[in-house]
Image (tube, rainbow, N blue to C red):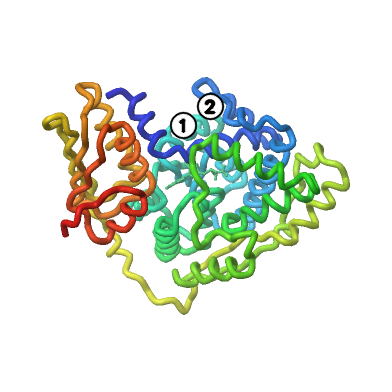
Amino acid sequence: MTIETERNSQAQANPVFMTAKAAICLMAAADISDASTIVRCLEPENHDPLQNMTDPDVVLGNALVVETKYRTMCSLIKDSGCHVCVDLPCGYTPKALHLSKAGMRFIGLDLPIVVQEIEPIIRSLTTSSDEISFHGIDATNYESIRTALQNVTGPLCITTEGMMMYFDAYEADAVVSNIRAMLELHGGLWITPDPEFVLQFFYSFHSIFGKNSLAKLAASKESAQQQANVANLSNPLIINPDDIIRSSKTAEDFINSHGMKVEKITLAEHIPTLSIYRQLTQEQIRNFKNAMNDCHYWVITLDEHRQQTDNSEQQALPFEMNYALENNIFKVSIGGRLDSLTAPQLLTAWEKIKTTSMPVGAEIDCAKLEYITSAGIRVFLIIQKALSRNLTLTNVHSSLKKLFMQKGFTVPPQR
Ligand SMILES: C[S@@+](CC[C@H](N)C(=O)[O-])C[C@H]1O[C@@H](n2cnc3c(N)ncnc32)[C@H](O)[C@@H]1O
């Protein structure tokens, strides 16, 4: 199998990586330094990630949100008192360049498909390579993050911009546990705009488009979904604009239940001057600054009264996969975690088998499958869609049965 096939498998299992391509194009539209250069370096291989955003107002509204996040987060990171920024996920942003120039160490964590592309670009644009490193990880996978940070001395400023909304409750829980474990190991804090991301969109669009804002937001949501083929999942950390008070409490309780506490930073008090103001009227800028009084970024730290956790228990079985074509059935057994890091391998195996002969069915033995994320489920669905009969899942552990049934798979009652 070629590198191209492996890359295709990664892209199909993790279409969410495309959202980061859109983000860097919006940063270029907002005139953030180095963003246009990064876009040019990415371009030969890719189509325009903003091609579905045909309304220039929708581009303007999105660029305003993205620039606000980027510049405010950079400023909060520099003021955090930490020397090391762990950007989870780093996407394609120029943050590594900006923070290393300011004397900080930058560690970019993202899915391997993103890291493989961005690392050589950033390295070609900097002379402070020693202060910058990148690692392919899955945020739900404790071991991948622990390994990436094993030689790092804290305290860490962990930053999460534009990721938490893509997880379901089960995945969000794993990611928050992993971040807590990293804070316990290295010290530091976690800064994220994600819980209030819908509010930031809503108030930013309203402040510049007034009564047209709902239509512009709907167009924006549709183009985001076309771009990356990912649904916005709801999880307890994401605040629902239709029920702000209750969902804010749920989100804070969720963080508290992980032994951490939240301090909310009012956005209006921290936004540096934005380049995009040049494209707005004075009235729009005034409205926008006012509206940002109702938006917050969350600074999350360990609660000193929490119960101690034993993170060594989080060690998972190593991933293993065996497969063969038997009587025209694709038979595969999977062990360990099927997540963003390993699901592409299952897809590559399926593609390889298909080049020999198209199977009529598939049987996946889940006896040793410990954990599956939406990337794994997505690959099961891709295989299912190509078959003329149902995908059979055997020996499913009781802890995974409900999840598979919710996703529409038939699970025989075995153990
Ligand atoms: C909207 S982009 C944000 C990227 C960057 N922080 C920015 O502001 O442009 C979402 C990012 O989340 C990353 N991502 C999604 N699921 C992930 C996971 N399970 N583990 C690590 N990164 C993930 C994607 O690869 C993508 O880079």
Residue under label 2, please give it.
42
Q: Say whether residue 98 is left or right of residue 7.
A: right
Quarter of the image for the N terminus: give it.
top left
Q: Say whether residue 133 is left or right of residue 295.
A: left
Asked whether residue 151 appears in the rendered view, the answer is no
Badge 1 local density, few (<14 within 10 Å), some, or many (20+)?
some
Q: Position of residue 3 (x, y in %)?
A: 33, 25
Amino acid identity at mark 1: Glu
The residue positioned farthest toward the front in the image shown: 389
The residue positioned farthest toward the left in the image shown: 327
Relative to residue 329, is residue 254 depicted above or below? below
**Residue at figure coordinates x 57%, y 30% from the top left:** 49
Badge 2 local density, few (<14 within 10 Å), some, or many (20+)?
some
Amino acid identity at mark 2: Leu
Q: Say whether residue 49 is left or right of residue 373.
A: right
Query: In this orientation, which residue lies closer to the viewer: 146 or 130?
Result: 146
Residue under label 1, please give it.
117
Q: Position of residue 255 (x, y in %)?
A: 50, 67
Disc 2 within 8 angstroms of ligand 1 (CB): no
Query: In this orientation, which residue lies closer to the viewer: 175 or 154?
Result: 175
Relative to residue 236, is residue 40 depicted above or below? above
Query: In this orientation, which residue lies closer to the viewer: 205 or 409?
Result: 409
Q: Position of residue 127 (x, y in %)?
A: 54, 34
